[in-house]
Image (tube, rainbow, N blue to C red):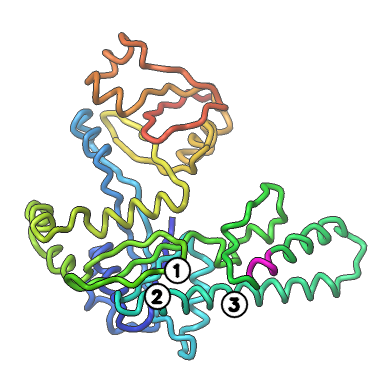
């Protein structure tokens, strides 16, 4: 999954990106008009515990790709780059200072609405001009949906608040609409700075970016105690990873063994077949069944052998809905 990070000048987005990815500021500060990509492992403590139990040759955490965009300056040369990358992202993260949180977040959201509204109006105009007899029913359905979207946007409401149908036209699901994407607001606070009330109904995370960046320079073993000493219960990295998964509707299942312990993100509501496809398309094609037990049960009983004795080891069919924390092994034949 790719999360685009953006903010107005001096909001702290560069420091946040550095904090999340471990890429030093000096590596990209001299490239203000270029997008920067960094990859961050999601340090799920369940994966760490599974690695302790199985002692694998390799441990693989889920990953989040963070894309730092140029400063959100609509009059600058990077405007086209910013909006192109926003459309390519799975999720948007807007960083703002505590003292301007309400004004800057509202201004950013307004630009997303304007972008979507312009796209809707242009598409409606093209549909109206199209007199071809092919695909008439599809165009009429798309036109009706776009009119609903136009009304929603004109009320300055995000499209993600609308209900979507799985058989909506491909264009509607193409990622062109920015207000369909999950949005996380990161408020950069300094010490005991008071945060304004935010009118946007989006998840908001408060982070002291400067302080956490200083703490990140300490040895890893010293970071958690220092965070607690400073009254920071959860690090920015942990907050962002958790919220990114939550906003995208993702859960994690695990595969375990002596060779590798690995976390696999899937959409909540995914079937066993869909989960297998995340690993390899052959599993989806030749799916027979999935062996399943839960992380919680494994930790409670201590071993797979004990799980089988207690009746906690299950065989699941292709329609089984995967749950967060499931440990799966797939049987397939191609």
Label 2 close to label 1 by CB (< 8 Å): yes
> Is residue 129 found left or right of 210 in the rendered image?
right
Image quadrant containing the N terminus: bottom left
Is 96 in front, or is 6? 96
Q: Which residue is mark 3?
A: 114
Pointer 1: what residue? 199
Mark 2 or mark 1: whose residue is earlier in sequence: 2
| Chain-order first, disc 2 or disc 3 | 2
281 relative to 186, above or below: above
Residue 69, image x, y percentages: 40, 75
Q: Which residues are magenta?
A: 149-153
Name the spot of residue 122 as percent of width and height, x first: 72, 76
Q: Residue at x 46, y 62 (%)?
A: 201
Give coordinates of residue 33: x percent, y percent.
Answer: 39, 83
- Magenta-highlighted stretch: main secondary structure? helix
Q: CA distance from mark 2 to mark 3?
A: 18 Å
| Tag shown at residue 21 | none
The numbered mark at residue 102 is: 2
- How many numbered badges does the structure rendering display? 3
> In the picture, which quadrant includes the C terminus?
top right
């Amino acid at each position: 999954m790719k999360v685009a990070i953006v903010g107005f000048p001096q909001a702290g987005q560069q420091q946040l990106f550095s904090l999340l990815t471990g890429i030093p500021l000096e590596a990209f500060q001299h490239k203000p008009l270029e997008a920067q990509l960094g990859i961050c492992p999601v340090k799920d403590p369940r994966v760490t515990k599974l690695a302790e139990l199985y002692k694998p040759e390799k441990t693989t955490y889920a990953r989040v790709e963070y894309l730092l965009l140029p400063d959100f300056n609509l009059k600058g040369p990077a405007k086209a780059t910013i909006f192109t990358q926003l459309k390519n992202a799975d999720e948007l993260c807007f960083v703002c200072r505590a003292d301007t949180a309400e004004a800057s977040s509202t201004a950013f959201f307004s630009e997303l609405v304007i972008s979507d509204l312009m796209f809707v109006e242009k598409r409606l105009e093209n549909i109206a001009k199209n007199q071809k007899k092919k695909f008439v029913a599809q165009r009429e359905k798309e036109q009706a949906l776009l009119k609903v979207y136009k009304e929603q946007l004109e009320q300055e409401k995000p499209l993600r608040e609308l209900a979507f149908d799985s058989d909506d036209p491909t264009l509607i699901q193409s990622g062109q609409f920015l207000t369909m994407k999950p949005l996380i607001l990161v408020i950069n606070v300094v010490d005991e700075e008071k945060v304004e009330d935010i009118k946007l109904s989006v998840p908001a995370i408060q982070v002291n970016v400067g302080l956490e960046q200083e703490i990140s320079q300490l040895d890893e073993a010293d970071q958690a105690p220092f965070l607690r000493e400073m009254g920071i219960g959860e690090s920015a990295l942990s907050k962002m990873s958790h919220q990114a998964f939550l906003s995208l509707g993702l859960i994690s299942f695990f595969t375990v063994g002596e060779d590798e312990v690995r976390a696999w993100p899937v959409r909540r509501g995914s079937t066993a077949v869909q989960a297998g496809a995340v690993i390899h398309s052959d599993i989806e094609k030749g799916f027979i069944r999935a062996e399943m037990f839960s992380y919680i049960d494994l930790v409670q009983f201590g071993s797979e052998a004990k799980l089988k004795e207690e009746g906690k080891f299950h065989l699941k069919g292709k329609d089984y809905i995967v749950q967060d924390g499931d440990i799966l092994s797939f049987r397939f034949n191609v």
